[in-house]
Amino acid sequence: MKQEPHSARKETPPHKEGRVIKLVLADDEHLVRGAIAALLGLEDDIEVVAEVGRGDQVTDLVLEHGANIAVLDIEMPGATGLETAAELKERAPDCGVVILTSFGRPGYLRRALSAGARGFLAKDAPVEQLAGAIRKVHEGGRYIDTDLAAAAMVGGESPLTDREGEVLRAAADGATVAAIAGKLHLTEGTVRNYLSNAIGKTGAENRMAAIRTAQDMGWL
């Protein structure tokens, strides 16, 4: 997260007393998380009430601190930012979600919006842009980075069905067909069919190539 030179910064309009935005920040990269928290801490209307490096700890912290906004990285242990956004939508619907990403994968934006996120921007965006996105989401609006939105439009919709995507995710660590079938409560023949369909739709030569293609496009 970059900070623009002081001379380039626009003056932040005064905010009403008591309107401080309480924010939970989640990123598994400690240095990045600390830098973002420090820069946001310079904003007079934003308070980082908790920092965490795992997605599966976010919702409890949001509820504990009564946070208004959760800023989430996508790739985190425990739960991804997209999974965490979906959980917040269920358990803490009044908390706005802003997703940060260092990946230009077109499928991520659609999945983030489906999960309930209302902000989506690059992790290396200037802090003024992030602070503005946080304020806009807090006010009930949306903030979508234009470059990421353009990439999402070019990339197109995922051709995979929900089940095909689920089977590919289960296969990502090299699991056998039998193991995938047991985990997803499917027959081995059904798993093979889903894998075959996914391979064909991604234009890949095998299941691992299909997984890489789907991940690169942000479909998984």
Image (tube, rainbow, N blue to C red):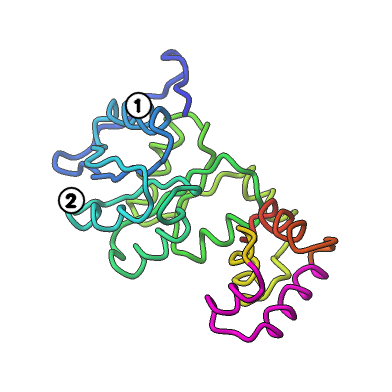
Task: Name the residue beneath numbered marker 2.
Answer: 65
The kind of residue on which mark 2 rests is His
At label 1, counting other C-alpha atoms closer than 10 Å, the crowd grade (few under 14, some 14-19, many 20 or more) is some
CB contact under 8 Å: marks 1 and 2: no
The kind of residue on which mark 1 rests is Leu
- Which label is found at residue 86? none
Residue at 51% of width from left, 32% of height from top? Answer: 125
Helix, strand, or loop for circle 2?
A: helix
Residue at 37% of width from left, 65% of height from top? Answer: 87
Residue at 33% of width from left, 51% of height from top? Answer: 138
Residue at 28% of width from left, 64% of height from top? Answer: 92
Q: Point out the residue furthest to the left here.
A: 18
User: How many numbered tags mark residues here?
Assistant: 2
Query: Is 8 within the magenta?
Result: no
- Quarter of the image containing the C terminus? bottom right
Query: Which quadrant of the figure has residue 214?
Result: bottom right
Task: State the predominant SS element of the stretch in magenta.
Answer: helix
Q: Is residue 94 left or right of residue 76?
A: left
Task: Name the residue beneath numbered marker 1.
Answer: 39
- Magenta extent: 176-201
Helix, strand, or loop for circle 1?
A: helix
| Above or below 207: residue 69 | above
